[in-house]
Image (cartoon, grey):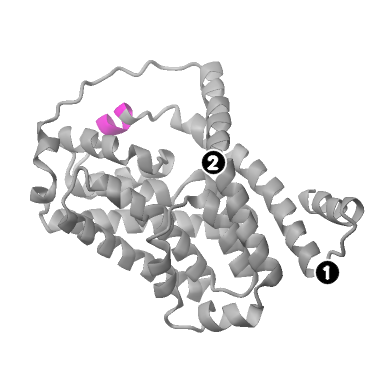
Amino acid sequence: MFKAIADFIVEKIFGLDLHSRIGDSINFFIYDTLKILFLLSFMIFTISYIRSYFPPERVKKILAKFGGFGAYFMASILGVLSPFCSCSTVPIFIGFVESGIPLGVTFTFLVTSPIVNEIALGWLLSYFGVQTAILYTGAGMLIGITSGIVIEKLNLSHLVEAYVYQIHMKDTETPDMDVRQRINFAKDAVKDIVKRVWIYIVVGISIGSLIHGYVPRDFLVKYAGPDNPFAVFVGVILGIPLYSNALGTIPIIEALIGKGVGVGTALSFMMSVVALSFPSMILLKQVIKPKLIAVFVSITGVGIIFVGYLFNIIL
């Protein structure tokens, strides 16, 4: 349906040839804008309805009940169900640590939550199907669990700023919602998130449409195709300094994949942007010391690189 609308606008309204570079680029822009806005709204509504059962206070209480590997596994599951933005990093970190939740379990949640989000899953479902979406979710959980376990084993609690342990956040009771309230909560989430991130959609799709229409396929395949042994590594390194979210990166990686870039390379780029972005690290510096940030970035980065190469092999 969205493709037919995009074709009609380009051919009938703009009078452009769909096979020309400018026509192809504009068609990509319109089609992706319509598709992503629809998928975004649907997935935000669905995940937000589920998320209404897991507010931060309840997540914290659930995690406090688990120990051993079960704590890491539950943290990764709750991370999938409770995606957060970078602005939530500090309060969530403080809330978890001061509640006695192990540092490694806290990092498992902080890694999994941004990587596996409703936007990425909605796009993966539409573009690659259920199998790839499940593999991506499992990979994100594995990266989070591995990062958390390694950080815990290294016994790095002394690298958390001392004041974090001295804070006592007041527990708040979260009232239960009925079905109507949960639906309204999900609707409000759709309005709020789309309102805040639409600019990322436009910028990301604009870049993607330029790549789609104007960047030669042979050039990208040569330097970022699956046959280049360094492609995933470069993708992760390039993703870390960027400030964006899945919304901003999805149209770009869609265009890159369409030009022959390896699926693993593109997905690892997106993972590094959403999990290891420079602004997120600046926020984390308020609660942990630079050495722990370096350890966190190194461990998570290695995990993302491994997953990227694995995806290039199996997809």
Q: Which residues are magenta?
A: 57-62
| In the depicted structure, whether residue 112 falls above or below residue 223 | above
Residue 104 visible in the picture:
yes
Left or right: 206, with 137 as reference point: right
- The x and y percentages for residue 158 are 8, 49
- Viewer-side residue, 276 vs 156: 276
Residue type at the position of mark 1: His
Q: Which residue is mark 1?
A: 19
Residue type at the position of mark 2: Val
- Quarter holding residue 205: bottom right
- The x and y percentages for residue 152 are 16, 53
| In the depicted structure, whether residue 48 falls above or below residue 40 | above
Q: Which numbered dot is residue 205?
A: none
Distance Cα–Cα, label 2 vs label 1: 31 Å
- The x and y percentages for residue 188 are 55, 25
Residue drawn at the location 80% of the way across and 52% of the way down: 6
- Viewer-side residue, 312 vs 168: 168
Q: Which residue is mark 2?
A: 197
**Mark 1 neighbour class, 10 Å CA radius: few under 14, some 14 to 19, many 20 or more:** few
- The x and y percentages for residue 172 are 27, 19
In the image, residue 279 lies in the stretch drawn in magenta:
no
Q: Earlier in the sequence, mark 2 or mark 1?
A: 1
Residue drawn at the location 26% of the way across and 57% of the way down: 147
For the C terminus, the image quarter is bottom right
Left or right: 305, with 130 as reference point: left
Q: How many marks?
A: 2
- Viewer-side residue, 13 vs 267: 13
